[in-house]
Image (cartoon, rainbow, N blue to C red):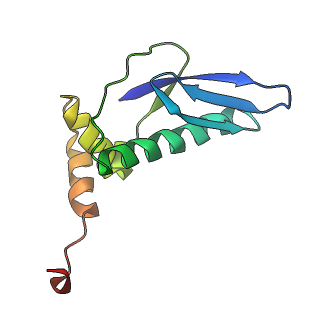
Amino acid sequence: MVYFCEINKNDDGLYIVNFPDKPNVKTCGTSEEEAVLMAEDALNAIIETEVSHGIPFVAPKYKKGRPVSVNYGNSIAATTAQAAAGQAVPATAARGTEEAMPAVPAWSS
């Protein structure tokens, strides 16, 4: 799944990233490349947080700007979001999700 972001250079020379589909996600970098890396981290973190708090997943609609991919291989929540959006979950993502889920300790029940 891909979200698109807008990247603008401010007066201080920082590259500011905004996601029109995720207005609560903002980040920056000292170069455009660094800003994109920060955007990937921020996007994956917010999706992880939203899904873990039961916030309904809304598929992206904005299709302009710089594409930023959701990292399914490392994110249980991103895989859940992909499934919630009606998209097929790659077998590698599904395996990663199963492996990433820890066993519940016996003392916790």
The image shows residue 36 at horizontal and vertical percentages of 60, 34
Quadrant housing residue 15: top right
Vertical arrangement, residue 15 with respect to residue 38, above or below: above
> Residue placed at 27% from the left, 43% from the top?
79
Where residue 37 appears, x then y in whole percent? 59, 40
Picture residue at 28% right of the left edge, 62% below the top: 100
Q: Is residue 36 left or right of residue 43?
A: right
Residue 94 is situated, as x and y percent measured from the top left of the image, at 21, 49
Q: If the image is split into quadrants, where does the N terminus sit?
A: top left
* Furthest residue toward bottom: 107
18 relative to 71 in the view: left or right = right
Q: Farthest residue in the right direction?
A: 12
Q: How many marks?
A: 0
From the viewer's perspective, tell me whether residue 103 is left or right of residue 63. Answer: left
Query: Which quadrant would the C terminus be assigned to in this image?
Result: bottom left
x%, y% of residue 103?
A: 20, 73
Write the residue at 85% across / 25% down.
11
State the residue in front, 11 or 36: 11
The residue depicted at 24 percent of the width and 43 percent of the height is: 80
**Foreground of the two, 4 or 25:** 25
